[in-house]
Structures are given as C-alpha cells and as structure tokens.
Image (spheres, rainbow, N blue to C red):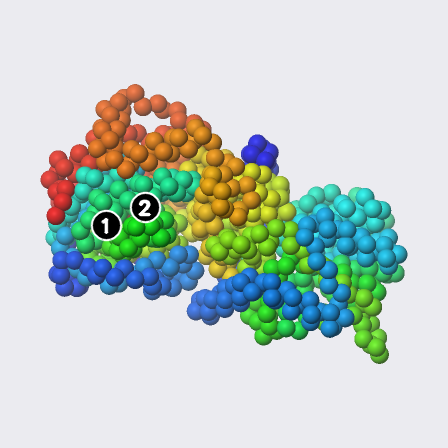
Amino acid sequence: MTTEFRLAIGAALGRERVRANIRKAMDGLVSKRAAAFPDADERERLRDQGEAIRGESVSRLPELLEELERSCTRNGIQVHWAETGEDANRLVLDILRHAGTTALLKGKSMVSEEMGLNEYLQHAGIEAVETDLGELIIQLAGEAPSHIIAPAIHKDRAEIAALFREHYPDQPPAERIEELTALARRVMRKRFRGMTAGLSGVNFAVAETGTLCLVENEGNGRLCTTLPDLHIAVMGIEKVVARLDQIPPLLTLLTRSATGQPITTYVNFISGPRRPGEQDGPRAVHLILLDNGRSRIRLDPELSATLRCIRCAACMNHCPVYTRLGGHAYGTVYPGPIGSILEPQLHGLAERGEMAEASSLCGACAEVCPVRIPIPRLLNRLRFEAVNAQADSPTLGHGSRRLAGQAGLWRLWAWTCAHPRIYRTLTRLMTALRPLQPTRIKPWTDTREAPRIADQDLHRQARAAGFTDRL
Amino acid sequence: MRPDVESPPHFQPSGTLSGTIGESGRRTRLVRGRAAGDTVDRARTTEHLKMPNTVYFFGTCLIDLLFPRTGLAAMRLLERAGLRVIFPQGQTCCGQPAYNTGYRDEARRVARAQLDAFPESLPVVVPSASCAGMLKVHYPLLLAGTADAARADAFAGRVVELTDFLTRVLDLRLTDRGPPIRVAVHNSCSSRRELGVADATMELLRRLARVELVEPERAHECCGFGGTFAIKQPEISAAMAADKTSAVAATGAAVLVSQDCGCLMNLGGTFARRGGGPVIKHVAEFIWERTSHDD
Ligand code: SF4
C-alpha cells in the first residue's frame, strides 16, 4: 500500500482539473452545510443527540440486531447475516438465481462497493445497472466512486457531456446540466422497465419496528425498491438504531451535514413486501446484514466510535487533505477522514495503516462530524496501534508498522528529552555546530527553506536574562 | 478593526492577586469555544484562573532551538505585566512528536519529565497552542490509569496558552509604538479547534491602535505543518502550505503572525523558497516589538 498510496498522491496532486473540480464542489458543500445550521446552539444540541443515539446503537449492537431481525421477520422481510463481503455477495447471487434474474437495478450503496458486488455479479453473468446519476457516470467511465455521497464529484460538466456522447450516441447532444440529467433520466427510465430485481443500501434500520430508512434525491432509490418484484437491501450491521423516534434527529443531521438540505427529496421507509390488496411494491424483501470486521472494531471501547458514522461525508468535504487529493488517491472504498479511520480497521494496519498518517490532525473533520466521532484522536490511536507490538490489542495488524530502527530513534529521543541535562548538552552542541547545519533537509527542503538553528538556545538566554529556574 | 480607545501600557488586574490558582483542573466544556461551536476537544476552562503574581514559562523545544527570541519576547511581556516569570531549566519538549507518531511509551517518559520540571502549583504559560494542547488535553489521556494520572490532571489544569493568558487572565492593555501596518493572522488548528483560543490573538492585536488586521482566505484551513505529517506526507503538506502562502500573500500584509511557531516555520520556509511574502513573526515577538520603548 505504502508506495502505491504515495504514487497516487503525487499523481492526484498533479491533476489540476480534478483538483479544481473537487475543490469547487467541496466549497459548495461546505457553505451549504454552514447555511443549513444557522443556529449554533441548535446544531450542537442536535450533534449531542446524534452522538447519544448512535452511541446507543453501537453499545447495544448485538441485542438491537436481534430485535431488528425479529421485527423485520414479523414484517415479512427475510433477514440474512453475512460475515464477510464474499458471504454477502454469495447471498445476493443466491437470491437472484433463485428468482431467475439476470439483471439487477441498483440504488446507491457504499456497502455494495465494500462488497465489490458489481464485479462479483458480472463474473456470475448478472448485469448490475447503476441508477444513481453519479454512480451511472462512474460506471460508464469505468471508475470507482471518489466520494461517498457524490461518487462522480471529481468530474465536471464537460467531462460528463463527453461521456454521455460516447455511450449514448443515439441521444440528442446534451451540454447543460438540465439536458444532461434529462438525458440520463430518459436512458434510465427505459432500463427500469421490465426489471425484476432491485438492490439498495440502508441509511438506518429501526430495531423496534423493522423499518428500513433510505434517503435519496433522484427517486431512483424508490423505483429500485418498489418497482421490481424483488428488493434486496444491504447494510452494515452498525446502521441499526433502537427506536423510530430516533430517526428524525438523525435524518436532519444527515441531510444537513451532507448536502445542506433540510430533508432529501425522497425519504423511503420500507416496512416489508407488498401486502394483500396493495397495488404495488416488491413481493419479496431481503435484508442482508454485513459484518465485515465491524464486530471486531466494536470490541475496542475507543475505536468503536468509528461505528457511529452515518456516512454524511461532511468530514471529507471539510478535509484539507481530501479536498486536495480527491477520493481516488486513497485507493479505497471509503476515502477521506472516515476512510482513514475505518479502512485501517477493516483491512488491517499492515495494509491500510498509512491512511492514518495522511492527516495533519487539524481537527476540521471532528469539528463538523454530526455524531461527534473524535477522528483525530482515533487517528492518533491507530498510529499507536500501528507500532504497538503488545499482544492484547483487538486492532487488526497492530504492531505491523513498527520498524526497529525508527523505534530505536524514538527511544533515544525520549531518553534525551527525559534527561534535561543531556537535552541541554545536546541543544548547546547543536547551537555550537550551527555553521555546519545542512541547508538541505529532505523532504522538508524540497519545497521550503530550512529553519536556522539559533546561536544560543532559550534555556541559556533565559538564564542570562535573569529568569529564575525555580520558585 | 482599530480599537477606539488607547489603553495605558500597564495591566489592569481583573482578579485578585492570590498568587496561585485552583488545583481542581476540572474538565468542563470550554465556554468560549461554544461560540465557535464545534470545539473538538472540550478543553478545561481556565476561567477559574485568578490573577497570579508568579508564572512558569514552558518555552517549547522548537522555540528553544530555533526561535529563542520569541520565547524571550513572551517572557518579557509577562514580566512587564508585573509577573515573576520562572523558566525551569529542567523543561525539554512536550512529547507531542512521539505521541502523534504513535510512540506513546516514549511520549509518556517525556511527559513525566515535564511534570517533574513544573512542580509548584503555578500557571504554566505556553507560547504555542499546539504544545499547550498536548500538555492540557493529551497529558491526562496519556497518563490516565498510571501513577501520574492525578499529577497530570492537576498540571493540565494549570496550563494556559500565552495569548489566552494575556487576554483573559491579564487583560493586557497595549500601547502601539509602531507605524501603521497591515498584519495577517494565521490561527493554528490547535488554537482554533483544540483549545478554542484563536480569538485571543485577534483580540490582542486589536489592542494595537495602528495595526490593520486581515485574515487570509480559508483562514480556518490548516497550513499543512502537522508536525511529523510534514515529513511523512511531504507532497500533501507542501500543497497545503503553497495554498496557504498564496492566500496570505494575497492579503498584501507586511507581517504574518501566529500563536504557533510550527505553522510559522512551515509558512516562513515556504515563503522563503518561493520568494517575497511578509515578515514572519510569532505574535508575542510582534507585540513586544510594537510596544517596547527602545523600538
Ligand atoms: S465520520 Fe462523521 S462526518 Fe464523517 S461521514 Fe461519518 S458521520 Fe459524517
């Protein structure tokens, strides 16, 4: 991962157009969020509430999931448990094969990205049809999402127009945004017809009532979950909440933090398949609960805060690193600050540990996180786990990034700083050797001048100026 | 941006001269931080600090080796305000570099040495929000559950960032002796989001009558220093520093000040390489120079 990530960073920083697109889009989202929370006190109260509700979800996870299963079953939703992404893929395939389907309509779902579902289905001869505009765009471009709520945010209008021209040559040319969306709508509407299976993600699942809550702005989610006879919902197990009355605060936090909307255009509450006498709705609803490492993350009392996340993407919109790199440079399903705490935990520190280092710990993410995940603190913790060789850590790959040489240097540094006399001798030595200070200190001086060591350290200057040493 | 009235140069005690401060060091939500809304770490409030007559000064290792003038200027400001300033020779580094790199045992060893160096129940004034954040917010976490937990808690309660101390505790009045000047302020992320004291630097500078204050575009954004981040992720760090220096340059300010030497080292180094740009100064040094007689 290490070298790949570094290469990707260099490449990403060099792509001026992508950088400009992302920066512009993020600026827009940042100001929309700010405008959506005009009252700071209300915002902070809501965030307290969000933290508490999602904290309850995580701490009571096992019992809430069992309750969810009972409630869903009562409603006629068939519940399946998947330990890994592979398991979840297989479940989806089994359900589709059983229904005799060869194509699947898809609403936007990050968990399906995590599973690598599209690729898996393709190998099995089943076509996955993305219906979210952003997902459609990147599917046409053969790319992965670069943002968790706006997957094609790195593309500008002209690029999308070119993409549509190439893939839909029979359609009238489209340039303006309205023309582009109208084109996509025409093309998509045709695809919906005659489809027998739809798949969606889940924003929240209510344990008490067995309700699946799904927000979206394009109506494609509603079509995917109501038009076909078969609806499959996939969700990470942490998305469960205890009660229905906890949904309104979470919804407003989610939509306001994500896009600055007071509420999304569509809010779907799915409470089961079509009932006798109903005119529409799927005849079968399946819910797949994906663990994929989440129950392991939950074992750590501090890092389990990661699971409070409601995937609003505010952290990445506000992140100085994400806004410069874009999502693709991370090379992971979840980019940005949430990705930097989640991915190393899901896949292990050996593979993804460098993500925890790709942060200046500026705190912009935690400042806006609607459920108050202390992201910088968790990044710090993951950096610790990465070099923590002790055996009792539940974090995958702990200790894997410990290098003997580096550890030795820090030990030496600590010994120096814990012994003031030695520290003072060293600073005195460094100031004395000041003329020999190198002017090139890589990588600092690649883009900056090196600071100059003073001719006399503050310890001695303070003493010389008469500042006493003790009371 | 200019204050209406010019105040006398000597400080007006706003509290009682009790000599020491409370030991309680309670964890409370930072009252001032609420205005900014989203304070990351709810740092201890320092509202309970009474006017001391003696303070400790924690110079920070960066200032010690690279910017001692800043340290001296800060201590002289405190001294001129009528305080006795103690500079313990036993102090070294706050331990943050190791802590943020994951080497907690090493950071703990260094933290204990600092606890030893500041034994009396006196305020510890720190000319860096980043280091102050380490001492105030992270020491209690780092040493929780160890034999030094209580000591770390009490110590954290005594730590005050310099500009916060100058404005809130001393309510320092300043007489501007310099010519009119435009000054850009870069508030460090620690001052903004960890300690919630970013407004103190602005407040102090507003007390200088002939200083025109400007903030660069995207003022809230990190400069890209981040300690070892600048070394571990040099490309991203450099991209952030490039954007920040451009924003600062666009203000046309003659001087760039900050409460953190880390940011200034990053931005100053970047400016030096790209050429041009403002004079770079820690806020303490800038204020000292603007208000001392011999200038
Ligand atoms: S970590 Fe917080 S800000 Fe980031 S996506 Fe999750 S809920 Fe949103």
Q: Which residue is mark 1?
A: B125
Mark 2: which secondary structure? Answer: helix
Image point (73%, 53%), residue name: A88
Q: A279 above or below B123?
A: below
The image position of residue B164, as x and y in percent, is 27, 55
Image point (12%, 53%), residue name: B82
The image position of residue A259, as x and y in percent, is 59, 60
Q: Viewer-proximal residue, A424 or B80?
A: A424
Image point (56%, 52%), residue name: A297
Q: Quadrant of residue A205?
A: bottom right
| Tag 2: amino acid | Cys
Q: Which residue is mark 2?
A: B131
Q: Viewer-proximal residue, A251 or A395?
A: A395
Mark 1: which secondary structure? Answer: strand
Q: Chain of mark 1?
A: B
| Tag 1: amino acid | Val
Sequence-wise first label, 2 or 1? 1
Lateral position of residue A166 relative to residue B233, left or right? right
Q: B173 above or below A398?
A: below
Q: Viewer-proximal residue, A5 or A434?
A: A5
Extreme-bottom residue of the structure: A277
What whole-number distance in Å separates the C-alpha atoms at marks 2 and 1? 11 Å
Q: Viewer-proximal residue, A293 or A379?
A: A293
